[in-house]
Image: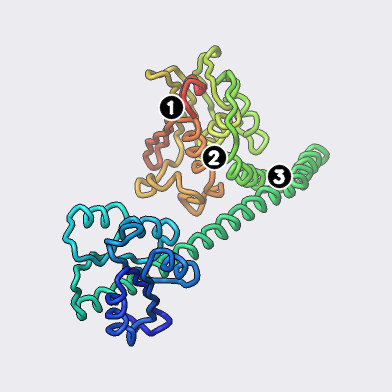
């Protein structure tokens, strides 16, 4: 324990008997910075003027009991370490003192000098620790606030930067498409196709970056959605980035299958999972998309491919932010993270089964009527 010096160990003792105050002063004045009061009013004035660390009070006093006094003091000065000194062995007072007011020690008269010295030192150490902990908590809160501010600034930067890049990138893609049409019969068309492919890859990355912050904070808007229409819309969007001509895509969904949910979130889920299925299939590529009503008022959507599959060692990591299964990965490790985040916001769940070199199946379960579920 740190050595305590006068000025760093302010102790207030309130007692209506002057001889008790005098005895206390004589014994402890060389160890502590003492403040003495023979009535409650004087004691309260001292508390207003000084940063008292330990407060001792007699239990039996004319205006109020020590327990009543300490109950008031703890509300005004919660860090003060409180102790009651009394010659009356009152079990009920002891119980209340500890349980209701938070008294540190209960001391009997006549007190023993060595014993009381130890208790006072321990009380001062307790006060020091309380203050130290409060300071640490304050520093942690300040650090937390600063970190949250930095994260917010980073989210804003990513969002704005993505938007700013997206404009010229769209123009670049348009110019590539124009070049492919203009020079269709020339060897140089392959360079436009390569540029277009890379630009589309960048476009997918930007799309996910824009969705990253949006999905977490966006307000959910429920509308009646046709699942088949959302699937076709997702495929149209995917076709703008890369051709699916070499893929056999089979869709088995009732044209009348509808759900009440958020269109943007459902669209993000479908596009990311279908896009993955297309990206990671190569020769004799086949992608199957099924949708049907499931028990428990759910819709089950199953997306299966015969692609490269997922390494079993990586299966539990695929929903982690920025996780990329292989060096050949064509994304930025956000697609499945955003998918799971969107599914969770829609009160659904996702399951995956995969065999390396044989293919992967994602099963997505979403409520038929999200409005009926408390968000």
Above or below: residue 368 compared with residue 186: above
Residue 156 left/right relative to 364: right
Give whichever of discs 1 and 2 has the lower sequence position.
2
- Residue with the most extreme bottom position: 30
| Residue 359 image position (x, y, % from top left) | 42, 36
Q: Earlier in the sequence, mark 3 or mark 1?
A: 3
Determine the residue positioned at 62% across, 51% down. 155
Quadrant housing the N terminus: bottom left
Picture disc at residue 196: 3
How far across and how far down the image is residue 335, in percent?
Answer: 53, 42
Which of pointers 2 and 3 lies earlier in the amino acid sequence? 3
Residue at x 29% of width, y 85% of height: 26
Relative image position of residue 263 (x, y in whole percent): 59, 27
Q: Residues within 10 Å of mark 2 (few under 14, many from 20)?
A: some
Please tell me in which quadrant of the rendered image residue 81 appears. bottom left
Dot 2 falls on a residue whose secondary structure is helix
Q: Disc 3 and disc 1: Cα gap in Å?
A: 35 Å
Seen in the picture, residue 112 relative to 58 is either above or below; the reply is below
| Left or right side of 370 for 218 | right
Q: Tell me the residue at 32%/60% (across/down).
A: 62
Judged by depth in the image, the label closer to the viewer, 1 or 2, is 1
Mark 1–mark 2 distance (CA, rounded to whole Å):
23 Å
Residue picked out by circle 1: 365
Q: Are marks 2 and 3 in contact (CB under 8 Å)?
A: no
The residue pinned by badge 2 equals 279
The label shown at residue 64 is none
373 or 120, nearer to the observer: 120
Quadrant of res 110? bottom left
Instruction: Using the image as rendered, state which of residue 67 and residue 133 is in the foreground.
Output: 67
């Amino acid at each position: 324990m740190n050595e305590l010096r006068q000025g760093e160990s302010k102790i207030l003792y309130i007692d209506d008997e002057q001889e008790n105050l005098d005895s206390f002063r004589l014994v402890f004045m060389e160890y502590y910075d003492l403040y003495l009061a023979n009535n409650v009013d004087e004691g309260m004035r001292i508390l207003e003027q000084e940063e008292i660390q330990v407060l001792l009070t007699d239990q039996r006093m004319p205006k109020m009991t020590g327990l009543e006094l300490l109950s008031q003091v703890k509300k005004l000065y919660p860090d003060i370490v409180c102790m009651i000194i009394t010659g009356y062995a009152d079990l009920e007072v002891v119980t209340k003192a500890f349980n209701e007011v938070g008294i540190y020690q209960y001391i009997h008269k006549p007190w023993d000098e060595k014993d009381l010295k130890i208790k006072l030192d321990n009380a001062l150490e307790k006060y020091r620790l309380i203050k130290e902990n409060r300071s640490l908590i304050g520093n942690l809160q300040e650090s937390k606030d600063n970190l949250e501010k930095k994260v917010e600034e980073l989210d804003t930067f990513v969002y704005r930067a993505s938007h700013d890049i997206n404009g010229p990138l769209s123009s670049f893609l348009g110019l590539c498409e124009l070049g492919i049409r203009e020079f269709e019969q020339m060897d140089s068309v392959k360079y436009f196709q390569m540029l277009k492919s890379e630009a589309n890859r960048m476009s997918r990355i930007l799309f996910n970056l824009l969705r990253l912050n949006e999905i977490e904070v966006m307000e959910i808007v429920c509308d009646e959605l046709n699942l088949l229409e959302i699937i076709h819309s997702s495929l149209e969007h995917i076709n703008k980035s890369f051709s699916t001509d070499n893929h056999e895509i089979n869709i088995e969904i009732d044209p009348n299958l509808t759900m009440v949910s958020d269109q943007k979130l459902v669209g993000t889920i479908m596009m990311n999972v279908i896009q993955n299925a297309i990206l990671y299939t190569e020769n004799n590529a086949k992608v199957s998309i099924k949708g049907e009503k499931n028990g428990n008022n759910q819709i089950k959507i199953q997306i299966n491919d015969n692609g490269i599959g997922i390494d079993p060692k990586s299966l539990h990591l695929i929903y982690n932010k920025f996780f990329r299964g292989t060096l050949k990965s064509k994304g930025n490790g956000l697609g499945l993270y955003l998918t799971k985040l969107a599914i969770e916001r829609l009160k659904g769940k996702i399951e995956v089964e995969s065999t390396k070199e044989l293919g992967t199946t994602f099963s997505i379960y979403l409520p038929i009527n999200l409005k009926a579920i408390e968000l």
